[in-house]
Image (tube, rainbow, N blue to C red):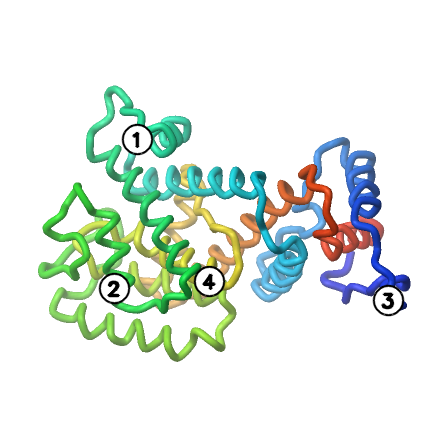
Amino acid sequence: MGYLKPWLVPKNEEKGHKTKMPETKEKFLKLISNIMNNEFNLSELFPNSNDQDIILEQIEDLKKCLDSFRPLEGRHIEKLDQYFDEVYTYDSTTIEGNTLTLQETALVINKGVTIGGKSLNEHFEIINHKEAIDYIKDAVKKKNSYNKRLLLDIHQLILKNINPQDAGKYRNIDVFISGSEHKPPTFLQVESLMEDYFKYYEDNKDILNPVLLSAELHNRLVTIHPFIDGNGRTSRLIMNLVLLQHGFPITNISSRNDLREDYYKSLETSQVNGNHEVFNLFIVKNAKESLIKYLEVISANGEESEKGLYFYNRVEELIKNK
């Protein structure tokens, strides 16, 4: 199967006729039901690769598929976004040592439930992270620029009620990362390095692929380690701020042991050897996976509309060429 063949507009559309979406969608649902045994796995049509350029091409096509469903609205989108937020909060806090399960995380976020046997700080980590997600979504909606003030606001939310004296402030002491070969720069360098960091963003925000830009900002921020605590969560939120600004869904990094290890190893390779390619590839793969998960849900919902025409035709084409 070839990658990303240009999609050909159906002849009836070339003549100015509108293709009926319900018929196209019905055909699509029947097709995936018959061919894939009722399990639609979009990953099979966009196979894994270790070639970053190929994955970026796949992401471009998947993003076109997602854009064909815009505007993204309705109850099914709200529920899907809620689920993505819950999983993202669970994984991002679990990576940092939080012990609440995914179900417990959802209960804390949605019901305000206090989980027995769990510390108050663990509850605040969950609540704060969800507030930070809401904050970056609001910033995207308002088209606020990413700058130092926005970064410090996000960090303040992350450490609120946990470490308030250090929340929203660059560190004033040197820190070490347990188990890592990377030694963060001295606190005396942080202000200058962060100025360079934001200059990099301004110089590249309109020219670099947004997925690569999100990876670079994630990597560079956590490498500088500008805060006493909360650097990982904040860096992953900044990554998603950039992705949301460009119309991508939340991209999650799994806390599953093997995948978390891949995350740490790729990051350390970048920090110790100065090779960003391994980490960028890791993030690119995760962004693609999140797009696929999102599309698999919205493409099969029961909404009667003409949305998704590009997606449904693209899937049919890829299945035929498989």
Mark 2 and mark 4 lie on one chain; the one further toward the N terminus is 2
Mark 3 and mark 1 lie on one chain; the one further toward the N terminus is 3
- Establish if 206 lies above or below 267: below
Q: Residue at x 59, y 63 (%)?
A: 56
CA gap, disc 3 and disc 4? 33 Å
Say which amino acid is labelled 1. Thr
Q: Pinpoint residue 199: horizontal percent, then vertical percent.
A: 32, 77
Q: Which residue is mark 3?
A: 16
Q: Residue at x 57, y 53 (%)?
A: 288
> Circle 3 — which element?
loop
Residue farthest bottom in this picture: 203
CA gap, disc 3 and disc 1? 57 Å
Q: Which residue is mark 2?
A: 224
Kindly check if marks 2 and 4 are in contact, taking CB atoms under 8 A apart as contact: no
Kindly check if marks 3 and 4 are in contact, taking CB atoms under 8 A apart as contact: no
Mark 2 and mark 1 lie on one chain; the one further toward the N terminus is 1
Could you tell me if residue 230 is visible in this image? Answer: yes
Q: Which residue is mark 4?
A: 245
CA gap, disc 2 and disc 1? 27 Å
Q: Pinpoint residue 224: horizontal percent, then vertical percent.
A: 25, 64
Say which amino acid is labelled 4. Gln
Query: In the drawing, does residue 154 fall left or right of residue 47?
Result: left
Q: Nearer the viewer, mark 2 or mark 3?
A: 3
> Circle 1 — which element?
loop
- Establish if 90 lies above or below 19: above
Rendered image quadrant of residue 202: bottom left
Mark number displayed over residue 34: none
Local crowd at mark 4 within 10 Å, few (<14), some, or many (≥20)? some
Q: Nearer the viewer, residue 73 or 103?
A: 73
